[in-house]
Image (tube, rainbow, N blue to C red):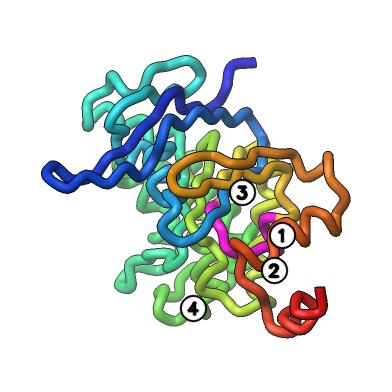
Amino acid sequence: MADLLSLVGVNKVYGQKVKTHVLKDINLAFKKQEFSAIIGQSGSGKSTLLNILGTLDRPSSGTVYSNERNLSSLSDDELAVFRNRMMGFIFQFHYLLPEFSALENVLIPHWLGQGNPPPDILKLAKQLLDRVGVSERMNNKSTDLSGGQQQRVAIARALINRPGVILADEPTGNLDSDSAEQVNQLMREINEEFGTTFIIVTHDRHIAARCDRVVEIKDGAIVQDYLTAEREERENWEELAPRYCNLRKGEVEWVNKR
């Protein structure tokens, strides 16, 4: 099976006179239905890596592939079409449009890529809102929703074009622990039900420890890449805390006793 998304020899350098080498010779591949976490300290290159995987940024050198298709050779317009059809994005601050209803926010990726939604897409949007548990709020403006509800709407929005991969940048970083747990469980259920690949940048070790795979990046280079099933649960937990992932309330005492 071809890799759904892969990077080969990818480097990213910012600046001309003063150069900052953010990513260093990254070789990384993801397959269909993987549920993966990317972890690392602030400034390690996590978000830059996610942006390049999502074709929101181009590498300084190296190649990005999707199903053996060389994405680096596509024009900006061609990449925009590819992104709209192939990828969904979830961000920490969800970026819902405040003047639009929850339903209208979900439909935005379809509007941008294909125009006014036909009845089957409108039906799908309503089904997705029901699936993420906010169907009763579909006509509410986003400003009338809680943070957890807004993130659920953002997940439905990411799914409207039936993408093969969802890229999530700190999707629970702006939520309380209960809402974060619900969003985490929802993403996992979608991963299993629809076969959607998830690549999640996170500081939440509750998410990272439950992913199928953890990729650790440090100073722009991959230093670990492992399957969590190959380790004991406590080993996964201790590996992630407290170096790269934030602790939730009540966990500090446990870590300090180690």
Seen from the viewer's position, the closer of residues 12 and 66 is 12
Closer to the chain start, of discs 1 and 3, is: 3
Q: Which residue is mark 3?
A: 37
Q: CA distance from mark 4 to mark 2?
A: 18 Å
User: Label 4's element?
Assistant: loop
Foreground: disc 3 or disc 4: 3
Q: Which residue is mark 2?
A: 181
User: Label 2's element?
Assistant: helix
Foreground: disc 2 or disc 3: 3
Q: Label 2 sits on what residue type?
A: Glu
Q: Is residue 159 visible?
A: no
Q: Label 4 sits on what residue type?
A: Leu
Q: Which mark is residue 185?
A: 1
Quadrant in the picture for the N terminus: top right
Closer to the chain start, of discs 4 and 1, is: 4
Judged left or right of residue 219, residue 255 is right
Q: Position of residue 238 (x, y in %)?
A: 77, 61
Magenta-highlighted residues: 201-208
Q: Position of residue 128 (x, y in %)?
A: 58, 53
